Image (cartoon, rainbow, N blue to C red):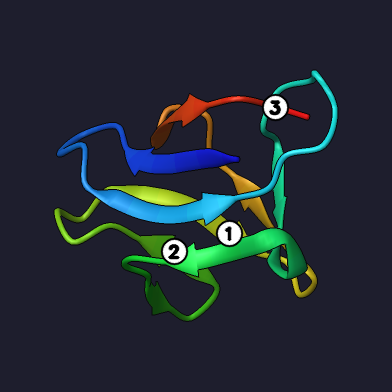
Amino acid sequence: MLIIRCSGCKKKLWKYYKIGKGEVLRCHKDRIKKIYYINQIKNKIYCECGQVIAIDKGKYYKMISKGFIYTGTKD
């Protein structure tokens, strides 16, 4: 389980169940277990501080690598 955080203000955004050892390039919506904060304007996901975190692609979020950090373990 990973905790996705904003890279700017370190605010928790959501808990995500990651499968595999690779990078976090996409977050599938059905694997998000708990949402702490999401601000969606059109198809972009923003943090409270204004940092762009991801782009909504329908079934998943395409993550912007400089917009977030994560902690936790991958399965």
Residue type at mark 1 is Ile
The kind of residue on which mark 3 rests is Lys
Name the residue that disc number 1 marks: 55
Q: Position of residue 39 (x, y in %)?
A: 33, 73
In the rendered image, the quadrant that contains the C terminus is top right
Looking at the image, is mark 2 or mark 3 nearer the viewer? 3
| Percent position of residue 6, x then y | 30, 41
Q: Earlier along the polypeptide chain: callout 1 or callout 3? A: 1
Whether residue 70 is situated above or below residue 51 in the rendered picture: above
* Residue 10 against residue 36 in the figure, above or below: above
- Report the Cα–Cα distance between label 2 and label 3: 23 Å
Q: Residue at x 44, y 56 (%)?
A: 14
Q: Is residue 41 left or right of residue 42?
A: left
Badge number at residue 74: 3
Q: Position of residue 49 (x, y in %)?
A: 14, 53
Residue situated furthest top in the rendering: 21
The structure residue drawn at horizontal position 79% and vertical position 20%, both measured from the top left corner, is: 22
The circle on residue 66 is none
